[in-house]
Amino acid sequence: MAFPDVYTASPDRYADASFRRCGESGVQLPPVALGLWQNFGGADVFETGRAVLRRAFDRGMNHFDLANNYGPPYGSAEENFGKVLHTDFRTHRDELIISSKAGWDMWPGPYGIGGSKKYLVASLDQSLKRMGLDYVDIFYTHRPDFDTPMEETASALAGIVRAGKALYVGVSSYSPERTRIMHKLLANESVRLLIHQPSYSMVNRYLEQGLLQTLGELGVGCIAFSPLAQGLLTNKYISGNAVTTRTDAEDTSFSKALLSDANLDRVRALNEIAKGRGQTLAQMAIAWTLRDPRVTTSLIGARNVAQLDDSLDAVNSLNFSTDELLAIEKYAVDTPNIDLWRPVNSRDA
């Protein structure tokens, strides 16, 4: 693919940028980071994704989050990011925090999924090749694997750090109990558990049920994904006119159960509170996830530059009054019966 235009990063990209320390580590992350879960794969318009990445970096966002199977097709988000990294960000690599993950299905057979050493090491090698990197800054085990001993997963992560293929390691969607176990296992290997990536939003408050306290006690950072509840906490569903736009599309990650009348009524009420704050609903939803300093970063997606800018502007108003928090509390209701990427509590111990 040809790249006729030359990108020059904004010299003022950090002028208004802010950062939060990740747990008790030396890593500082932007309060809002960009995830490439969707909109950056081979089925998407490459130049749109490229424009989003450029704009993000020009606004001081230096953390880009990927995984082996982001696409579609699987692996294509890393391939596309690698192209942008090579052409636009080549001289800025040392400014960036680049993360990837493995744990969900990637290729057929027993070694293409889970938390085994075989899978994690092979997957990271493939990810590095797709992105054209010698190392990633953060490598996650993407989910709990109840069929693999945690000792094996911890040993694999520690070996990856010692091999120089990742500077730091993290976990995603682990319960408080498993997080403590992994923290101890890695500490025994003289490796820090840097960060945990849970789903967290106004309709998925599992993080508050002991996990956030655990992370604070262990000194582990927290990067919350899906702060907009897969688009529910935006303006698109408020009128009811766009209810079928995503649920009828090929993207099946959106849970139709989110669009209950009760949920939509709560979203409309939250939107009125956001208006009173001078924010869009999406901006308030992102800011709300950052109200506790133990949450390092809120991880967003973006279909285009305008959507990215709207999300990044959430940092312009991160403070909430007591009255605002009390008003939000009436409508920010956890929905544990809906699959919003929370651990399976019956087995996750």
Image: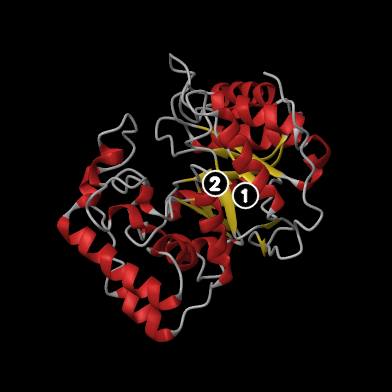
Pick the residue in front: 107 or 280. 280
Amino acid under disc 2: Met
Residue density around tag 2, few if under 14, some if 14–19, many if 20 or more, within 10 Å = many
Q: Residue furthest top?
A: 109
Instruction: Tell me the residue that label 1 is attached to.
Output: 193
Q: Residue 7 is drawn in which quadrant? A: top right
With 333 as the anchor, is 162 left or right in this view?
A: right
Instruction: Tell me the residue that label 2 is attached to.
Output: 182
Q: Can residue 233 be seen by looking at this rendering?
A: no
Q: Which one is closest to the eye, mark 1 or mark 2? A: 1
Amino acid under disc 1: Leu
- Residue 134 percent coordinates (x, y): 76, 29
- Residue 335 percent coordinates (x, y): 26, 57
- Residue 262 percent coordinates (x, y): 17, 61
Image: 67 above or below 61: above
With 81 as the anchor, is 68 left or right in this view?
A: left
Q: Which element carries disc 1, helix, strand or loop?
A: strand
Image: 176 above or below 119: below
Q: Are marks 1 and 2 in contact (CB under 8 Å)?
A: yes
- Residue 43 percent coordinates (x, y): 47, 24
Q: Earlier in the sequence, mark 1 or mark 2?
A: 2
Q: CA distance from mark 1 to mark 2?
A: 8 Å
Pick the residue in front: 91 or 1. 1
Q: Which element carries disc 2, helix, strand or loop?
A: helix
**Quarter of the N terminus within the rendering:** top right
Q: Residue 29 is drawn in which quadrant? A: bottom right
